[in-house]
Image (cartoon, grey):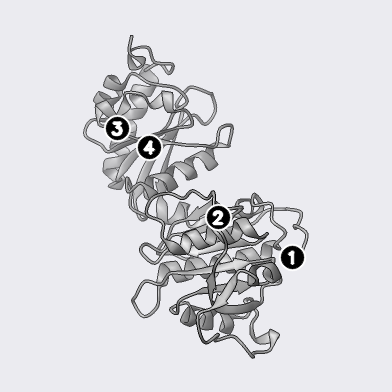
Amino acid sequence: MNQWMAPSIKFTEQLQVFCEIASRMAKHEEADALLFLIEGSIDWPKLRDATGKHHVILASDRKQHLAKAEDFDFDTVELNIPDSPVYERLTQALLESVADDLLTPGATVIALYSGFEVGVIDSMSVVSLDEHLGRLTVHDLRQLETRVPLDTLKTTVDLAVDIGREGREGKPVGTLFVVGDHRKVLKHCHPLGFDPVRGYNIDDRRLEDTKVRESIKEIAQLDGAFVVSSEGTIISACQYISAPAAEITLSKGLGSRHWAAAAISRATGAVAIAVSESNGTVRLFQNGEVMLRIEPFRRAMKWKDFEYDPPSAGD
């Protein structure tokens, strides 16, 4: 018997009503898609009938829960964060959908999920992506478990997101920041030519200074990476990264800047922050892997703080 004929989530009268309400809400909000966070397979033909012609995205932590879904014109997203809170799973599903071109960064989505009882879709939210994904929590960076102080990471990420979203003078800009463990990082760097920050006093190279950040946006148009100390000081700019890239695997479509970011984060204790020139996406690399991806949105990113123990400083 096919999996969709023996669903683990019953297509109940309640689910039917939820689908009808979601469809009306989608029409009212001019939503781009319905997103279901599911914890088991569903009777796909019934779900297709209940959602009509709406664009439907199904997200689950288990590939088998999505089996046969695409046969009924559903898009699917596989998550890799089991046992995570609903908010984190929803955020990951939206990020993956944007990355897979299933949604645009400014889309509006009607999300349906199990908010109270496992296996029962009992909650619904209207999500505006440019608002929802424009807010990161401090927890997102703390998960990196890095020796780079949190304030330095936040400042550098904010700057990278600004560059990815705004570009410069109407043109897209891609760049790379390598943060922390700067002495070891410099052993893998070679200047591409003139270093615009060389010779300046340390107080004139601190990222906490608004004027410095604006200057960095201008310099970012030049080739090469920025090397940033754990204290948030620009050590050098326009650097060519030559760290070994052996045993590193990246997704298709990522270019030399991302390979350099992965390589230097594998060879040192630094966190590399790459800004894609093609779409402005910001990726944080640690130990050769992408640990966090931030999509470019029209609005400025807002950090949502909560109580935390600051990580230890130093390189």
Q: Looking at the image, is mark 3 or mark 2 nearer the viewer?
A: 3
Q: In which quarter of the image is the C terminus?
A: bottom right
Residue 304 seen in the figure:
no
Tell me which label, 4 or 1, sits earlier in the chain. 4
The answer to whether residue 130 is left or right of residue 272 is left
| Residue type, mark 2 in image | Leu
User: What kind of element bears circle 1?
Assistant: loop
Separation of marks 3 and 1 at Cα, in angstroms: 47 Å
Circle 3 residue: 74
Quick check: 215 above or below 49? Answer: below
Q: Where is residue 212 in the image (x, y as percent from the top left)?
A: 58, 82
Circle 4 residue: 35
Quick check: 189 above or below 46? Answer: below
Q: Where is residue 206 in the image (x, y as percent from the top left)?
A: 65, 79
Tell me which label, 4 or 2, sits earlier in the chain. 4
Q: Nearer the viewer, residue 40 or 13?
A: 40
Quick check: 301 above or below 170? Answer: above
Tell me which label, 4 or 3, sits earlier in the chain. 4
Q: Is the residue under label 1 in contact with that under label 3 (CB below 8 Å)?
A: no
Separation of marks 3 and 2 at Cα, in angstroms: 29 Å
| Residue type, mark 3 in image | Phe
Circle 2 residue: 136
Q: Residue at x 46, y 50 (%)?
A: 250
